[in-house]
Image (cartoon, rainbow, N blue to C red):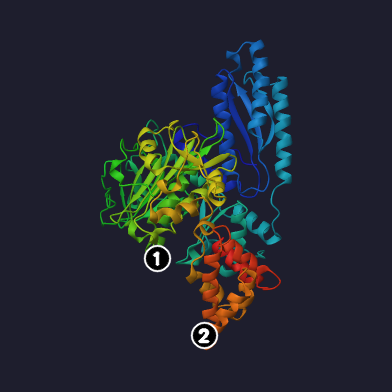
Amino acid sequence: MVLYDLAGQPEYYTSHCACIEAISLSSPAIFLSMVDVSLSQNEITKQLYYWSTMISSVCSECPHPSEVIVVGTHADKVNKKGLRSRTNAIEDLAKAIFKKQHFRGFIVLDATARFSDNMKKFIDVLSESNDTVVQQCPVISTDCNILYAFLQQMVPSEQVVTISQLLSKLQADETNVLPTETSKMIPLLTILSDKGLILFIFNKHSPDESWIVLQKSVLLEKVAGVLFAPESFPEYRALASNIGLVPITLITECFPDLDTHMLVEFLSQLKLCHLVDSTLKIVDTSQTLFDLTRGSENGSCYSLFFPSLINVDKPDSFDAYNTKGSFGWLMRTKEEHQFFHNRFLHVLMLTLMNGCGGTETLCNPQLKSLNRQCIVWSTGICWNSNEGVTILVDVVEQFRYLYVAVSLPGPQYQELTVLQDVRKTFNQFCPSVDVEEFVIDPRQVRNLFNKGVMSSSLSCVEISTLKNAILNKISGARDLNGKSVVLAEWTNADADACLAKLIGIENDVIGPKLEDLMNEIGAVIHSKWRDVGVQLGIAPGVLDGIQRQNAEKPRSCQASFEQVFNEWKLQGSETTYTWTHIIGILRRPAIGENDLAETLATKFK
């Protein structure tokens, strides 16, 4: 059992989350959440929601719920009668808020009364929680157990060793039964890392020099204590620019006793930063380009981007961003006290940085036009290119609303995955937050950005409502204010496919492309063209005519399939000319192409 006393300063919140995530991969933790009972009920509610959201986020990978004990402090500031009623209210509130954890109870403690009934109750509850956690500890193989014990005894005072150092120690140990080859040691270290017992950082350039972090929390505490220290702390050093960039040279200078390459990989694996170079242009909201060679004698141009170190507000105006608004999308929390955690926002910014500006961009022709430049501020990020592509993500109104605005100059950009990145990151880091998704009238995105608050006049439609209206041809779909919505007025021609994809009905609204039908179906099962035509409901006389027309052609089956698909499109309605419909037909016994149907379902549904 290892105890962690987390600093209360907001600057450390993101590193706290990273630390707990790293140690809670397979074994649940016990959280003691301290609450000042003299505060207002509203403030206590906010605090409990904050810790519940944080705990759910950092323990999302753990297969067991965490143990939570809420401890009341400052009881001496509340009279006994008021304390009794407040205790019951806080207990009921905490029980409802920590519903996704194992809530053990609310206990008011007086530090001066060491032998009070409440202190005894607290110790008993803590002991029960400890027993539960021990029983749920991960089971690992004998070799992993031996290796873990050896690592703990090998260098108890050190924080990091390499595989070569470990193997050297094992070879010198006459009682050793563990493998001494790098290729056989890596799987054992990977298992220990996956269980959260260590952190194994693979060095792809030199596997023998891969790093083993024995005490992740100790190393993180040492590094985070400097990187994220508030200005009033003696540990504080002015390393980062106002947009969260720290030159690698300053990292080396600040931590001379640590391997810089290891430290960069360590911080990156914990999703605290992202390595960038001078080809990525990052500017603040005043359009000032940060010099990545700052502090470098040899012209090195690599820096680490830390979203949690951004110290600049978003711009006053939306005008600088050339976002005409092909479509807008909004996600909001359903409950007043729920919010998007800082850790989620910071990891999302790293994800967008990696997807739009990282090395992957060089291999992705649909993102190249972003020109590897972006503008960042404390609650958002905006990619903007000379070719008219703009992707803007921002969080507003006390972290309850997150919106995305995308402006696209043409259909070649319809495969942008920014919304998938947002949803995936949200699911991982905000599992306890209930949200609703909306499509925003893009003409109003500018007002949302400039005001930073949700206006009652904002025109937006809940996605399931809009989807139902489109698929079922319901005229007069209405927004939240009861105003009739005309979809065509909300998008331009190039954005229709993006909006359809956004609300999850892209292929059912637009319909399959003939080229895709021929490549995916016609070229694979060309001999079954007539059977498919029958199942599509095309009249036998029409099929006979198609057969006569193509009988003498070299590729008669493919030509017949193309006519079948064209006939299907002409005769079908917008609810039947869909990938869903053709995939269902392929599954029918008369066709019997289940494997092909599954492939298409994965690709097009």
- Residue at horizontal 66 percent and vertical 10 percent from the top: 81
Furthest-front residue in view? Answer: 541
Within 10 angstroms of label 1, few (less than 14), some, or many (20 or more) residues? few
Q: In front: 253, or 246?
A: 246
Location of residue 120 in the rendering, given as x and y in whole percent from the top left corner: 72, 25
Name the quarter where the N terminus is drawn: top right
**Residue annotated with mark 2:** 555
Q: Is residue 482 left or right of residue 316?
A: right
Q: Is residue 85 left or right of residue 331?
A: right
Amino acid at dot 2: Arg
Rendered image: mark on residue 60:
none
Q: Calculate the distance from the C-alpha at mark 1 to the C-alpha at mark 2.
A: 36 Å
Amino acid at dot 1: Cys
Q: Is residue 596 visible?
A: yes
Location of residue 367 in the rendering, given as x and y in whole percent from the top left corner: 38, 59
Name the mark nearer the viewer: 1 or 2.
2
Comes first in the chain, label 1 or label 2: 1
Q: In front: 485, or 166?
A: 485
Q: Circle 2 sits in a helix, a strand or a loop, which is it?
A: loop
Location of residue 163 in the rendering, given as x and y in whole percent from the top left corner: 53, 62
Q: Circle 1 sits in a helix, a strand or a loop, which is it?
A: helix
Quadrant housing residue 302: bottom left
Rendered image: mark on residue 363:
1
Evaluate if marks 1 and 2 touch, with contact meaning CB atoms under 8 Å apart.
Answer: no
Name the quarter where the C terminus is drawn: bottom right
Location of residue 92 in the rendering, given as x and y in whole percent from the top left corner: 68, 25
- Residue at horizontal 49 percent and vertical 48 percent from the top: 422
Q: Is residue 255 visible?
A: no
